[in-house]
Amino acid sequence: MNGADPTAQNRLKTAEDRLARAIDRLETVLETRSQGVALTRADTELLAQAQALQSENAQLRDLINDTAVRLDGTIAGFKSKLAGRG
């Protein structure tokens, strides 16, 4: 993401890391519980939510990457046009 705000990039990366760790912890707890005890409805719902969050996270990462590529292309185009004027 060339040209993007490094502070925003750091905040995004921190948020992604926290989300991934939280999902991992949730899955670990649910897997551990499921080995010895049948899943409760609440556990099943939490697992479904965790899976939905993982899917959403992947979609958002793809969107961010696509946006970054498009933005980099736009910036390069502007730089090229500006260089042609000089």
Image (cartoon, rainbow, N blue to C red):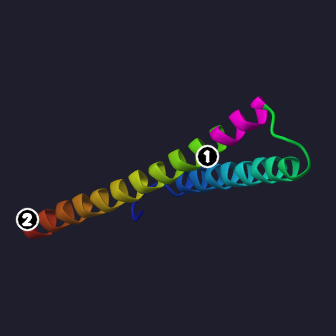
Residue under the point 80% across and 52% down:
31
- Quadrant that contains the C terminus: bottom left
Amino acid type, mark 1: Gln
Residue lying at the far front in this picture: please name it: 38
Amino acid type, mark 2: Arg
Q: Is residue 42 magenta?
A: yes
Residue segment shown in magenta: 41-48
- Quadrant that contains the N terminus: bottom left
Q: Disc 1 to disc 2, how far (Cα)? A: 51 Å
Q: Is residue 3 above or below residue 23?
A: below
Q: Nearer the viewer, residue 11 or 26?
A: 26
Q: Nearer the viewer, residue 65 or 31?
A: 31
Q: Is residue 50 left or right of residue 40?
A: left
Indicate which disc, 1 or 2, sits on the residue closer to the N terminus: 1
Residue 51: % across, % down: 61, 46
- Mark sitting on residue 51: 1
Tag count? 2
Q: Is residue 25 magenta?
A: no
Residue 61: % across, % down: 47, 55
What residue does disc 2 label?
A: 85
- Crowding at label 2, few (<14), some or many (≥20) Cα neighbours within 10 Å? few
**Badge nearest the viewer, 1 or 2:** 1
- Mark sitting on residue 5: none
Q: Is residue 44 left or right of residue 81?
A: right
Residue lying at the far right in this picture: please name it: 36
